Image: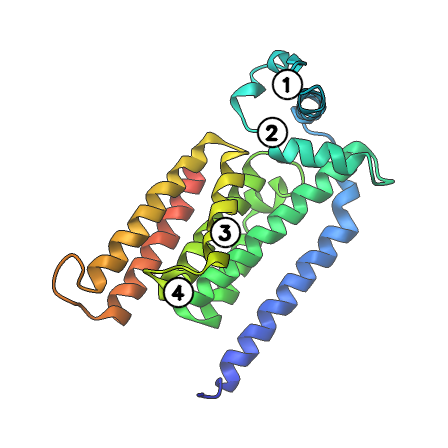
Amino acid sequence: MTAERPSSSLWRRGSWGLLLYLLLTIAATFRDYGITWDEQAQSVYGRALIRWFASFFSDDSFLRVGNLFYYGGLCDIAAEMAASLTPQSRYETRHLLSALMGFATVAAVNRIGTIVSGPVAGFFSALFIILTPAFFGHMFANPKDIPFAALCTVAILAMLAAWDDLPRLQFSRTLCVGLAVGAALGVRAGGMILFIHLATLFAAWAFVNGRLGPPLDRAAIGSLVKSFLAIRDGLLGKLL
C-alpha cells in the first residue's frame, strides 16, 4: 500500500479541524437565533403529522396548516419529537437540529471534494460552503432547504462512493443510497432529481466499462463523471 503523502495528511487534518470548529460554533451559538416567519407554522405542521400517525391516519388536521401538505414533514416530525425530549425550548431544538443538518452537508461536501480531486479540494469545498453567508445563516433556521441540501448531498456522496463497487453494489451501499434518497423525498418532492443522478451514474459506469461501446480510460472518464455529478447537484440544489 502506498503511504499517504505528508501534504495530503495535513489537508485531511485541516478538514477535521474545520469540521470540529463548525461543530463547536453550532454548540455555542444555536440559542442566539430568533424565530423565523414560518417556523411557527412548521412546528404546528409537525405536531399535526405526529397526531395523524398516532391516530392511525384518521386525524387529518395537517391538511389545514396552510399549504404545507405539499411538502414532506420528515424533519418537522423529528424536530417536534426531539423538542419533547430535550430541556431546550421548541425553537432552540429546531435550530440545533437544522444546524446539525447543515454540519452534515458540510461534512458530505468535504468527502465529495476528496473523492473527486483529493484532500485539498475536500478542505476548500467545506471551507467555501461554510463561508457562504446564505448557507451559514439559513443553517440555523431553515427547516426545509437545509435538511434537503444535507440529504441530497449525502445521497450524491453515497452514489459516488458506490462507483468502484458497480455493477454489483454491496447491500450497505444500496441501503445508504436508498435511505438518503427516500429521506430527501420526505422533505421535498424535488428529491426526485436524485433518480436522474442515479441513472446517470449507472449509464456512465456502463459507458466507461465498455458496456455501451468500446472501453475507455476509466480513471480519466470516471473522474470527469464524478465531477459532473457533484457540480450538477450543487447547481440544481441552488435552484431548488
**Circle nearer the N terminus (1, 4):** 1
Q: Around disc 1, counting alpha carbons within 10 Å, would you say few (fewer than 14), some (14 to 19), or many (20 or more)?
A: few
Residue shown at the point (79%, 35%) measured from the top left: 83
Residue 92 vertical position relative to residue 25 in the rendered view, above or below: above
Q: Position of residue 172 (x, y in %)?
A: 50, 58
**Circle nearer the N terminus (2, 1):** 1
What residue does disc 2 label? 73
* Residue 101 in view in this figure: yes
Task: Give residue 68's quadrant in the image.
Answer: top right
What residue does disc 3 label? 175
What residue does disc 1 label? 57
Q: Disc 3, disc 1: CB below 8 Å? A: no
Residue shown at the point (16%, 56%) measured from the top left: 212
The Cα atoms of the two marked residues, 3 and 2, are separated by 21 Å
Which image quarter is the N terminus in?
bottom left
Query: Which circle, 3 or 4, is nearer the viewer?
Result: 3
From the viewer's side, name the closer residue of 38 and 175: 175
Q: Is residue 11 left or right of residue 193?
A: right
The Cα atoms of the two marked residues, 2 and 1, are separated by 14 Å
**Circle nearer the N terminus (3, 4):** 4
Badge 2 amino acid: Gly
Badge 1 amino acid: Phe
* Residue 131 in view in this figure: no
Q: Residue furthest left?
A: 214
Residue 227 vertical position relative to residue 101 in the rendered view, above or below: below
